[in-house]
């Protein structure tokens, strides 16, 4: 079993990386990833760290795009309201809420599975992210 400079196994650090991505927020994730990229020599843990950051960014981007829809509707509603009119699409709010909840569930399940697989230095294939990492890190 390969050890990190912290004295723990590479697999355990990989699991910590994914759990940090799930619960720790961007600052903690960036701090941990920065340490790994600068101090650790194991290629798998470096790729795991970058994959976690990229997955966090992808989930944030998707969430932003979903939230953009009601923002546009609110802008139209505000413009119509200037002239005393009213504009609303109530079903959109329900759809956006469903999509945000589904995205949160998918993120949680994916990161938990990745953390469990990381304990044995495994991973779950995410083709676009894995391809991007392979192109830029190999």
Image: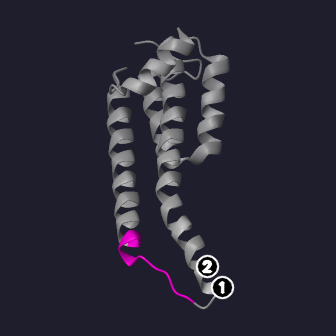
Dot 1 falls on a residue whose secondary structure is helix
Which secondary structure, mark 2?
helix
| Discs 1, 2 touching: Cβ within 8 Å | yes
In reply to whether residue 91 is colored magenta, the answer given is yes
- Point out the image quarter for the N terminus: top left
Q: Which mark is residue 123?
A: none
At 49% from the left and 62% from the top, the residue drawn is: 69
Residue 110, image x, y percentages: 35, 40
* Front position among marks 1 and 2: 1
Q: Is residue 48 above or below residue 67?
A: above
Q: Is residue 19 left or right of residue 114?
A: right
Q: Nearer the viewer, residue 110 or 9?
A: 110
Q: Is residue 102 above or below residue 61?
A: below
Does residue 34 sit above or below 3 in this rendering?
A: below
**How many neighbours does mark 1 have within 10 angstroms: few (below 14), some (14-19), or many (20 or more)?**
few
Q: Which residue is mark 1?
A: 82
Q: Residue at x 38, y 52 (%)?
A: 103
Taking 69 as reference, is 92 left or right? left
Q: Write down the region rendered in magenta.
A: 85-93
Return the residue at label 2: 78
Residue located farthest toward the bottom when viewing the structure as drawn:
84
Most distant residue in the front direction: 83
Name the residue nearer the viewer: 33 or 70.
Answer: 70
Q: Tag 2: Cα neighbours inside 10 Å, few (<14), some, or many (≥20)?
A: some
Structural distance between the alpha carbons of marks 1 and 2 = 6 Å
């Amino acid at each position: 079993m390969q050890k990190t400079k912290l004295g723990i196994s590479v697999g355990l650090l990989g699991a910590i990386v994914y759990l940090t991505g799930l619960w720790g927020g961007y600052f903690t994730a960036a701090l941990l990833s920065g340490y790994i990229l600068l101090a650790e020599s194991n290629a798998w843990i470096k790729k795991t760290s970058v994959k976690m950051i990229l997955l966090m960014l992808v989930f944030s981007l998707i969430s932003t795009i979903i939230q953009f829809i009601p923002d546009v509707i609110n802008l139209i509603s505000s413009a119509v309201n200037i002239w005393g009119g009213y504009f609303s699409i109530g079903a959109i709010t329900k759809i956006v809420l469903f999509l945000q909840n589904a995205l949160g569930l998918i993120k949680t399940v994916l990161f938990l599975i990745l953390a469990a697989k990381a304990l044995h230095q495994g991973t779950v294939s995410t083709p676009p992210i894995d391809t991007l990492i392979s192109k830029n890190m190999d």
